[in-house]
Each structure stands twice: as C-alpha cells, then as structure tokens.
Image: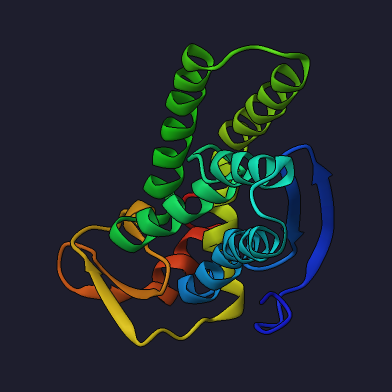
Amino acid sequence: MGIRYHWKIEKVIILPFGALTIFHEDLNKKIKEEFWIVIMGPLFQIVFTLIIYLFYGMNDFIYYSLIILGFNLLPIFPLDGSKILNLFFNKVTGFKTSHLLLIMVSILSIFVLLWQASFSLIFILIILFLIIRIFSEVKDHESLFNRFLLERYLKKYHFSKILKINSMDMRGMKRDYGHLFFDGKKYISEEYRLKKRFDFKGRL
C-alpha cells in the first residue's frame, strides 16, 4: 500500500511484536492515504492467520499471531493502534492537539498494561521500548509541530476544504484543510500567516 501511494520507505525494524515500517514522508500527507497504509498491516495479519487456520486448524502459531495482532492494536505509540487513533484525532481536532492526545492515551495505556499484565523478560523489554518511544514523542512534540507548519510554508499544499480560525493561533490547524485566520479585522490566508512566522520578522 505504501508503494501504491508512492510513500518512501526509510527502513523496516523487526520487533518481537511484528515489523515497524518507517516512512520518510511529509506530515501533511492525506489522512486517507495514511489510513490505508496503517490498516493494511493488521488486515494482512488477519487474512494470513485465517488462511493458516483453514489449512491447519487451531495451533500455537494461530494463538501467537492473535496475541501479536491484539497487542499491535493497543493505542500506544508506535503501535498500529496508536496510528489509527491518531488519524481519528486528526479528523476531529488540530494536528498539535492530536499529537498531545495520542501521547496522553499512550501513557495511560502503558499504566493499564503494567497493572494488568504478567511480567516476563520479553514483556519488560517491549515495555521499555514503548516507554522510550513515548518519551521521544514528548521530547519532539514542538519540533514535530514546527515541521508540520514548515512543510506547509515551503511546499504550498492545495486543499479543497477550508477551515476558518477566529484568531491568529496556528495550534488549531488540521490535516487535509487549508486555513483562514482572523487578525481582528479580516481573515488572512494560511500562506500569509505562515510567512509571518517563518520570515524572521514575526515570532518564530
């Protein structure tokens, strides 16, 4: 699906709970494209598991595959469940708020997982990996939002839907939308607002 939408694959990391594909793409890619890329991982695993079940019946491989599928759908960054949830957040609120919500849900889910799960070495290693990735997202939150804005400033995206923001606050900017900002007197374009941020005359 990544190839179908011409997304650039940077690397694939093999982990105990599956493979993590890292794409080198814009944050402003269409939500629809990212949804199909994200959802194809779990869908492929479901289909593959069903095929094995039809030929060999219930066995340890099926059990292991279902555990991995369920774990991968947890809303914890960077699992597929968190990516699907993030796309939902992106549909209903701004990019910056979406990322903050995802971080909070990930942290809460980690605590629930620690409270419910039985511990083993592999479990501890996976949890440590997830915690490191979550704190990496916390550390990179502002730079991620700045990258989101800078992409729009440099690449001049064209969107069919326009969202009016009744202030000059860019934190309400959403994916899949162009924006108009109210400066107190009139609405100004997204391009002009971004220029004021990145031309070093406005606040960086």
Q: Report x, y in % for residue 183.
A: 23, 64
Toward which corner of the image does residue 7 lie, by quadrant?
Answer: bottom right
Q: Which is nearer the eye, 1 or 173?
A: 1
Can you say whether 159 is above or below 131 in the image? below
Left/right of residue 90 with respect to residue 204 in the rendered view:
left
Q: Can you say whether 69 is above or below 185 in the image? A: above
Residue at the image position 54 percent from the left and 81 percent from the top: 156
Is residue 199 something one can see in this rendering?
Answer: no
User: Closer to the camera, 189 or 82?
Assistant: 82
- Tell me: 92 left or right of 142: left
User: What x and y, as percent, mark residue 190?
Assistant: 38, 73
The picture places residue 83, in percent across and down from the top left corner, at 52, 52
**Image quadrant of residue 55?**
bottom right
Q: Residue furthest left?
A: 185
Nearest the viewer among 20 and 153 is: 20
Quarter of the view holding residue 120: top right
Q: Image check: 76 left or right of 2?
A: left
Horizontal arrangement in the rendering, residue 95 relative to residue 43 (left or right): left
Q: How many marks?
A: 0
Query: Can the viewer see residue 135?
Result: yes
Q: Position of residue 90 (x, y in %)?
A: 39, 59
- The residue closer to the viewer here, 98 or 129, is 129
Q: Which residue is drawn at the image coordinates 54% and 64% (left, top)? A: 39
Kindly identify the residue that appears in the image at 26 percent across and 72 percent down: 163
Q: Is residue 140 above or below residue 124?
A: below
- Which color scheme did the rendering employ for the protein? rainbow
Residue at 75% from the left image edge and 57% from the top image edge: 21
| Image quadrant containing the N terminus | bottom right
